[in-house]
Image: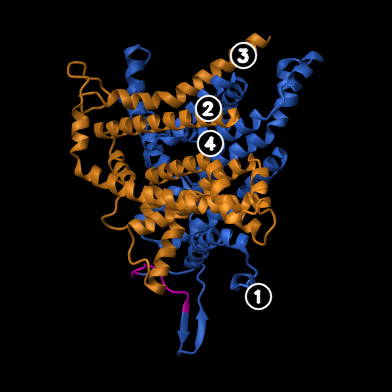
Chain colours: A orange, B blue
Amino acid sequence: MNQRRSVFIITCVAFGFAFLYIPILSMVVFSFNASKLVTVWDAANSPTLKWYRSLLNNEEILDAAWISLKVAVINATGSVILGTLTGFGLSRFTNFRGRFTLNAMATAPLVMPEVITGLSLLLLFVALEQLIGWPAGRGITTMTLSHMTFSMAYVTVVVQSRLATFDTSLEEAAMDLGAKPLKVFFVITLPIIFPAILSGWLLAFTLSWDDLVISSFTSGPGSSTLPMVVFSKVRLGVSPEINVLATLTIAVVTVIIACVSFWMARSNRVERAT
Amino acid sequence: MRRTPWSQRFGLNGRGLVVLLPYLWLLLFFVVPFVIVLKISFADIALAIPPYTSLFQWDDQKVLSIKLNFNNYAFLFTNELYFKALLNSLKVALISTLFCILIGYPMSYGIARAKPATRNLLLLLVILPFWTSLLLRVYAWIGLLKANGVINNILMALGLIHEPLAMLYTPFAMYVGIVYSYLPFFILPLYANLEKMDWQLLEAAEDLGCRPWQAFYKITLPLSRNGILAGSMLVFIPAVGEFVIPALLGGPNALMIGRILWDEFFSNRAWPVASAVAILLLLLLVPFMMWYQSIQARESAGAK
């Protein structure tokens, strides 16, 4: 009986992973296809790196990638600061005025449809410009501010769940020995929750790097991000260069995730051993 | 006598200062924008920059008059298109959520019951697609589903079909895209819930003569209720307002409310109408969001 059940479960898991991974693998395979038709394999001339060369010479994509990179790095850094403060406040101060509101405001962006967030932020920037003349026009600044607003929610969740499983007696001991709260935070709390902060940073970076809808609402002329350029190309159908872009993205993500989880597994072991 | 610092006179202390920055940030960039959307949904479309009229007018420099214009809402309610789009979005999100449960539950269960080393690897494999671009993963389905795409090519090579199936730009493609993109969002909270499950309960039930399916139905399913609900909300709520997937896979006839909002804004430059659509969509989703928050609160209370 147990045997039969586990066969059923294993089959389901296998099918589920096939569903998740076949589309990704198909992009990788066809990025080496010589044919412009993309999904029709040109056996005579493939595999080839010609679309890789053509992507690396595509000014439009490279410019957009540079803008996306700038926005993503500033966004990740800013939202880590905001998200850590929020996560710390919510998990350590259980009783303060406005805790409920802060909690609601910090988690709502997680489920808010992007079209609503995008529209509302754009209207805010337009109203602010009329009122105080800032931000003048829309571009990298407005996109970064918008990205930070939804990314910080994700960082908050990551930091908060790390703090929930954290032994507070270390902090208390330091306080008993006379350390000031600020010192306790930087010397004890921050190093311990650092892995969560790092994953928060990476998550915020990815969310921003990948965002299409909110960027489209809040960007201005000359500040098209990579997803915006990809979207306008992809609307017209498949393109070999986009397959190359996908393959490079997957390669970079896999390497980073593998390194980070290896490093975290090791630091966990060290933590347990000491 | 020591003077009280200014911050304490305002009821603030070190703790207050920690949460003050995110609090003000969210107030300015999350709450205030909704007030502005609400305001503009009562404005009129105008050929101006920005393209809407002001609600406030000073008559003879003295009297402030506020003109609320309900035309946008009247327009939405009298025009069948918007109502149909809203209903269709709810239907698409609901069906997609059901498919996420059907595919995601056995996967979460399998991962939670695997050996610890396998479990971490499988979990990593669920998270990995989540880190790669959603846009590019949706794009991958164009290559799989189109007329001379991978699936049709394989089926034709096997001789199962002679004409390519029309799959891309159909509701089917849209469902596949949504389920595919949101599956990790369903699996992760459910896994977090199942991971905490006491599996000895199942053994006890089986020792007492319960059949595995019965034990699943009577023990595992009720205990994982919060995980299922949390995961479902993470799929359902954003899927109602989804724009990218219907735009890329659904074809021109895919009536989704997120797409209507986008078109009103970008193609018609009808900012007040787009704002009214946003307000209606938000009103519809707020109960679900509150439900999600109460599930989350129960989950974290249960964990302690």
Between residue B138 and residue A14, name the one nearer to us: A14
Q: Which mark is residue B185?
A: 4
Q: Which residue is mark 3?
A: A6
Which residue: 67% across, 42% down?
A: B300
As drawn, the residue found furthest toward the front would be A177
Q: Amino acid at mark 3?
A: Ser
Side of A100 where B76 appears, left or right: left
Tell which tag, 3 or 1, sits nearer the viewer. 1
Mark 4: secondary structure: helix
Mark 3, Cα crowd under 10 Å, few <14 / some 14-19 / many 20+, is few
Name the amino acid type tagged 1: Arg
Tell which tag, 4 or 2, sits nearer the viewer: 2
Q: Which residues are magenta?
A: B47-56
Q: Amino acid at mark 4?
A: Phe
Q: Mark 2 vs mark 1: tell me if same chain.
A: yes
Chain of the residue under the numbered disc 4 shown in the image = B
Q: CA distance from mark 3 to mark 1?
A: 71 Å
Name the residue carrying label 1: B2
Q: Nearer the viewer, mark 3 or mark 2?
A: 2
Q: Quadrant of the C terminus of chain B?
A: top right
Q: Earlier in the sequence, mark 4 or mark 2?
A: 2
The Cα atoms of the two marked residues, 4 and 2, are separated by: 12 Å
Residue B123 numbered mark, or none: 2
State the image coordinates of residue B52 (x, y, percent, origin top left): 40, 69
> From mark 2 to mark 1, how far is it between C-alphas?
56 Å
Q: Quadrant of residue B273?
A: bottom left
